[in-house]
Image (cartoon, rainbow, N blue to C red):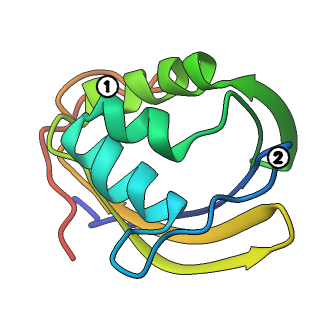
């Protein structure tokens, strides 16, 4: 039996120079990162969204990463789920940090974190 799954996780991205405040018609850095850069595999949007050095919080860890390291961390999931689509559900900006609650859906086409591909798609 296949269970439909929608993954939810929290990410906090902190820039040493503070969060970039979007203009009135610009997406927030979190939306630019997930809904533009990662959904569209747009490296220009990725560079605009992510500072040179960030602190990434996930799975009860805080890790200092370069922009290039964050991009390389994203590659296995983008490869395993080639049709993945991220959606920012909520975001909070405080000081120099942004917290976001995300959902993402996609079809697993290759192994990811030791899980064999299912070729099944999670749907909203």
What residue do we see at 87% from left, 41% from top? 62
Residue corresponding to mark 1: 116
Q: Residue at x 46, y 73 (%)?
A: 23
| Relative side of 99 to 43, left or right | right
25 on left or right of 19: left
Q: Is residue 47 above or below residue 19?
A: above
Instruction: State the separation of the CA atoms marked 1 and 2.
Output: 40 Å
Residue 46 lies, in percent from the top left, at: 42, 37
Q: In the structure shown, which secondary structural element does the residue marked by tag 2 occupy?
A: loop
| Image location of residue 16, percent across then percent down | 86, 42
Judge by depth and name the residue closer to the eye, 110 or 20.
20
All told, the count of numbered labels is 2
Helix, strand or loop at disc 1?
loop
Residue at image x 24%, y 22%? 110
Q: Which mark is residue 17?
A: 2
Residue 67: % across, % down? 60, 25
* Local crowd size for mark 1, using a 10 Å CA cut-off: few (<14), some (14–19), many (≥20): few
- Measured along the vertical axis of the image, is residue 54 above or below residue 27? above
Between 59 and 47, which is closer to the camera in this rendering?
47
59 with respect to 88 (left or right): right
Decide: is 76 above or below 3: above
């Amino acid at each position: 039996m296949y269970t439909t799954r929608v993954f939810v996780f929290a990410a906090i991205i902190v820039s040493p120079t503070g969060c970039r405040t979007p203009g009135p018609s610009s997406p927030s850095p979190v939306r630019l990162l997930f809904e533009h850069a990662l959904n569209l595999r747009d490296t220009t949007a990725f560079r605009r969204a992510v500072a040179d050095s960030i602190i990434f919080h996930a799975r009860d860890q805080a890790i200092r990463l370069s922009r290039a390291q964050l991009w390389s961390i994203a590659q296995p999931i983008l490869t395993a789920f080639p049709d993945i689509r991220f959606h920012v559900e909520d975001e909070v900006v405080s000081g120099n940090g942004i917290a976001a609650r995300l959902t993402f859906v996609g079809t697993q086409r290759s192994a990811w974190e030791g899980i064999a591909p299912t070729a099944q798609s999670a749907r909203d």
